[in-house]
Amino acid sequence: MRSRAMPKPSWNLDYMMWVFTRLSGLSLILLIVIGISAGLLMGARSQMDLGTLMRWTFFPNSNHVLDSEIPDLYLWANGFWQIMQILVVFFAATHGFNGLRVVIEDYSLSGFWQIFLRFLILLLWIFSIMVGIYVILGS
Amino acid sequence: MALSRKVSLSAGAKYKGGGPMLAWVLHRISGLGIIIFVTLHVIASFFTQQFGSDLGISINIIYESIYFQLFIVFCAIFHGVNGFRIIVLDIWPRLIRYQKESTWLEWFVILPLYGLTVFIMIQRFLEG
Ligand code: HEM
């Protein structure tokens, strides 16, 4: 088995997604650092536990940490964090579902099944981004 | 993009790719682990919230268990650190010469980070 060749730089799906995977990876690290720092501030007065910190870090939505009795939680439900959540959802879903596509297509798929599975992944991608944004804007 | 695989599973398992191969396998498993978990979590929450269905609650029980959490935390830490390593090597291709060393180096970051997290998680789990 040869290793997968790096896609040739041009306007094709594989190269665009290769670049996007790297950029979104870096963006996710940045978003996580911002989220974790804010989570530490948020939990400083109430000895927030690790699970809550992680839930806030990976999806900085005030409803995601409701069970933890954080004082003045409403202060954390604002437009800034809504934008951060949308960025997390967009980068993670796009990066992750494209990764899923890459793994599937490594196993010798072509023709009908490739198109079918690409379509299925596209649907899942659209669905999860829509559900994500619906939850974010509704909370 | 489809590759033709002319290698049997047993031959593949004996291939001695060392650290970088282990990193590749774990990167794949951890990436899939995260995307499957996130998708399940979104679907479960959506069904619980919209239709009050029990399906969501039974999925929740799976990933609230400590074993699942130990697994998914490893996935997240490994995938993030190893992904960063991949990106650095891609930006500065000359560093590929040190690819083996880079996979050792990343374990110096991953093991303490994961070890500390596991310690806290198990401590809290035992406290109940
Ligand atoms: C800390 C943030 C992250 C970083 C730095 C990162 C980095 C990367 C990189 C560089 C790759 C390409 C690997 C390659 O070309 O061999 C990759 C693949 C992948 N990532 Fe991530 N990632 C991150 C977060 C995520 C998240 C949140 C998910 C899931 C939602 C995810 C799922 C995947 C999957 C499924 C693959 C494909 C694995 C493969 O091709 O073997 N990643 N990641």
Image (cartoon, coloured by chain):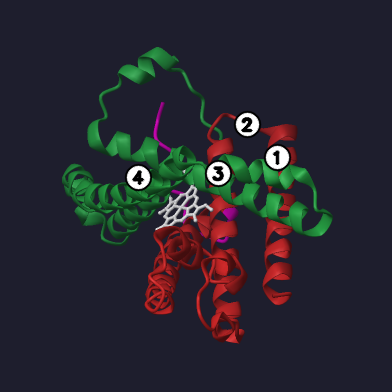
Labelled pair 2, 1 in contact (Cβ < 8 Å) = yes
Magenta residue span = A1-13
Using the image as rendered, state which of residue B110 and residue B66 is in the foreground.
B66
Tag 4 subunit:
B
Residue A86 is covered by the magenta coloring: no
B11 sits to left or right of B109: right
Coordinates of residue A86 in the picture (x, y in percent): 61, 72
Q: Residue at x 43, y 73 (%)?
A: A39
Q: Which chain is red?
A: A
Residue under pointer 4 = B122
Q: Quadrant of the N terminus of chain B?
A: top right
Labelled pair 2, 3 in contact (Cβ < 8 Å) = no
The picture's colour for chain B is: green
Which three-letter amino acid code belongs to the residue tagged 4? Ile
Separation of residues labelled 2 and 3 (CA atoms) = 32 Å
Q: Say which mark, if any, is on residue A28.
A: none
Which three-letter amino acid code belongs to the residue tagged 2? Leu
